[in-house]
Amino acid sequence: GESVGLHLPTLSVQEGDNSIINCAYSNSASDYFIWYKQESGKGPQFIIDIRSNMDKRQGQRVTVLLNKTVKHLSLQIAATQPGDSAVYFCAETRGAGGGNKLTFGTGTQLKVEL
Amino acid sequence: GAVVSQHPSRVICKSGTSVKIECRSLDFQATTMFWYRQFPKQSLMLMATSNEGSKATYEQGVEKDKFLINHASLTLSTLTVTSAHPEDSSFYICSARSYSEHYGYTFGSGTRLTVV
């Protein structure tokens, strides 16, 4: 949903553990969702996406789960590594085939402890 | 893969001056580009949607006369911050729509603007 300018929540995990980052969206008309990773001072980097006709999608070490009933999205990172430390944003839009604008969630700071 | 180049990466300007930020799609044509602003520890806030050959569409609360957007070609969009003030200091990021294998909204590397 719309970012409300809140400070970023933080998730701290031990290296090697699995991470789960959650996101709630507000627009029930959204049908395309993307997870981004943003390192300090850089632009967002695509991680994985999912369309609303799917509940789950897997990539390399990452899995996205979509629950349309409660408008919830999660990103699971397996065997979290120090290089995974960053801010993670979910983004939503309506119409994967068009040039529609993305709306970003508030983001989560992931810190990987050695 | 799709690449978006954004320049400059950092700029410091004096209050009252104007600053231009460029966003180029390097290996694809982007009919639509987006401009975001991000304050520290916050999310990306969409400022405007830039369509090639037409006027940009600004989000509510964004001053179109202060943030001038030009999208004169399929590979270049520019954002000009006019009469900059310290409160305009922020991280500005552009994005271009690329029809790659992941329906990418490819982002530039961002521009850190500091107004002194």
Image (cartoon, rainbow, N blue to C red):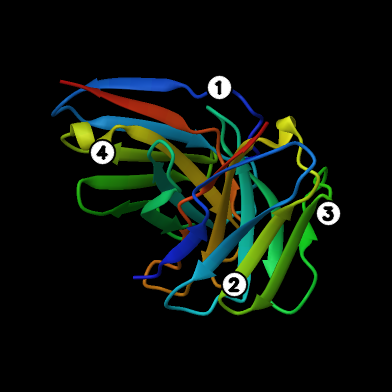
Asked if residue B58 is positioned above or below residue A16 in the image, the reply reads below
Residues tagged by mark 3 and mark 2 found on one chain of the structure? yes
**Pointer 3 local density, CA inside 10 Å: few below 14, some 14–19, many at least 20:** some
Of circles 2 and 1, the one toward us is 2
Above/below status of A63 relative to A86: below
Going by the image, does A57 lie left or right of B107?
A: left
| Tag of residue A7 | 1
Question: Disc 2 residue type?
Answer: Leu
Q: Tell me the CA gap for discs 4 and 3.
A: 40 Å
Instruction: Identify the residue at horizontal 66%, vertical 39% (top origin).
Output: A2
- Residue A96 image offset from top left, x and y in percent: 53, 66
Circles 3 and 2 in contact, beta carbons < 8 Å:
no
Figure disc tally: 4
Identify residue for label 4: A77
Residue named by callout 2: B76
Residue B64 is marked as: 3
**Chain letter of the residue carrying label 1:** A
Q: Tell me which numbered mark, 3 or 2, is placed earlier along the sequence.
A: 3
Image coordinates of residue B98 in percent, x first then y, are: 48, 72
Quarter holding the N terminus of chain B is bottom left
Relative height, residue B42 to residue B6 (above, below)? above
Crowding at mark 4 (Cα within 10 Å: few <14, some 14-19, many 20+): many
Answer few, some or many: residues within 10 Å of disc 2's Cα (few below 14, many 20 plus, some between 14 and 19).
many
Q: Which of pointers 4 and 3 indicates the residue nearer the eye?
A: 3
Disc 1: CA contacts within 10 A as few (<14), some (14-19) or many (>=20) = some
